[in-house]
Image (tube, rainbow, N blue to C red):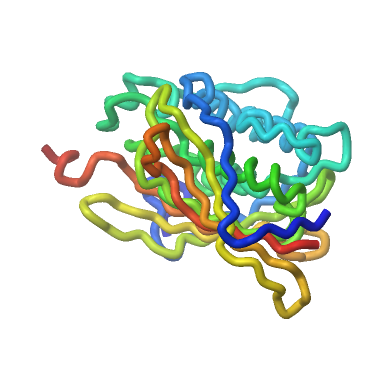
Amino acid sequence: MATGKFVTDLDKGDVLGPVEYTLSAFVIREYAHIVEMHHECFQGADGLIMPPTLIHLDKLRLYNHACPAGTGPTARIHYEYDAEVFAPARVGDRLSVVGHIRDRYLKKGREYVLLEMELTNADTGQLLIRYRDQVILAYATKSEAAA
Amino acid sequence: MTITLEAGTEFRTRPRAMTRERMRWYVDGQPTIAADDGRVHTQPPTIHDDDDYARSQGLPGIIADGMISTNWIQGLLIDVFGPQFACRSRLQTKYIAPIYENMQVIACARVDTVVVNEAGKLVHTLDVWCEDDSGKKLTVGTAMVEAA
């Protein structure tokens, strides 16, 4: 169990969260703005829905909750994003996100971590998004770092 | 709105330069969204906005967060399919080449299949990718969108 320390310590079997929060219009508009998605459903005055990719910042919510010591000695490199949306999340929804570290493995000298997350409506229990995220824990390979 | 496209239909965004500012927007957006207080927040140096820190991690300089290219693909899909993409869909992307400062990036999608599923809903599957101005693929993946 590596929670409670650095993100780089996370290991297979670790559970992150759950963390609950209420989805705000500010969060949707700000996220859509920084990635230049100027669609009315994300940046309008009302009727906003969550951009599916916002699930990526829920990963950071889980990291902050489970790993209060921070990132660790190396910067992560994002390798894979895979999100399936089953139903939309809307402004004012109370949401719950939980993550499971499914794997940590070495490939070509670099360590990979596979995280699976589920975002649900906290009031109804409905699954909204299932997300698989893979990161490389450091750009430098093990041999380069040791040199 | 239900849209029907033929297999093989391809669409793409205009080229966009992955500028230092676009990379920083995503960096600063993260603590800003986490705080959710209506104000802008910043974070310590990252490989996406600080050359010295990026070099300390073995990189030649800052690189773009992969989520920027994923979002540019998603934006293209919402241009085509509308808000339904945020209601019932799947998007998978892998970052197969780094995107450095000022590289030109074009988000692309090509319809792979169009079927009616067991629930009677129209489903499009697509190949998606980002390429540079020479056609080299930087990000690759697949997408699915199910009509309402």
Residue B80 visible in image: yes
Q: From the image, which quarter does the C terminus of chain A lie in?
A: top left
At 33% from the left and 27% from the top, the residue drawn is B54
- Residue lying farthest to the left in this orientation: A147
In the figure, B102 relative to A132: above or below? Answer: above
Q: From the image, which quarter does the N terminus of chain A lie in?
A: bottom left
User: Where does residue A116 sit, x and y in percent of width and height?
Assistant: 52, 60
Residue A15 visible in image: no
User: Where does residue A126 sit, x and y in percent of width and height?
Assistant: 76, 65
Q: Is residue B110 left or right of residue A73?
A: right
- Please tell me which residue lies in front, A22 or A5: A22
Residue B53 image-quadrant placement: top left
- Residue lying farthest to the right in this orientation: A46
- Please tell me which residue lies in front, A114 or B8: B8
User: Where does residue B104 sit, x and y in percent of width and height?
Assistant: 45, 28
Q: Is residue A138 left or right of residue A95?
A: left
Callout count = 0
Q: Is residue B20 left or right of residue B5?
A: left
At 48% from the left and 57% from the top, the residue drawn is A115
In the figure, B142 relative to B59: above or below? Answer: below
At 64% from the left and 60% from the top, the residue drawn is B6
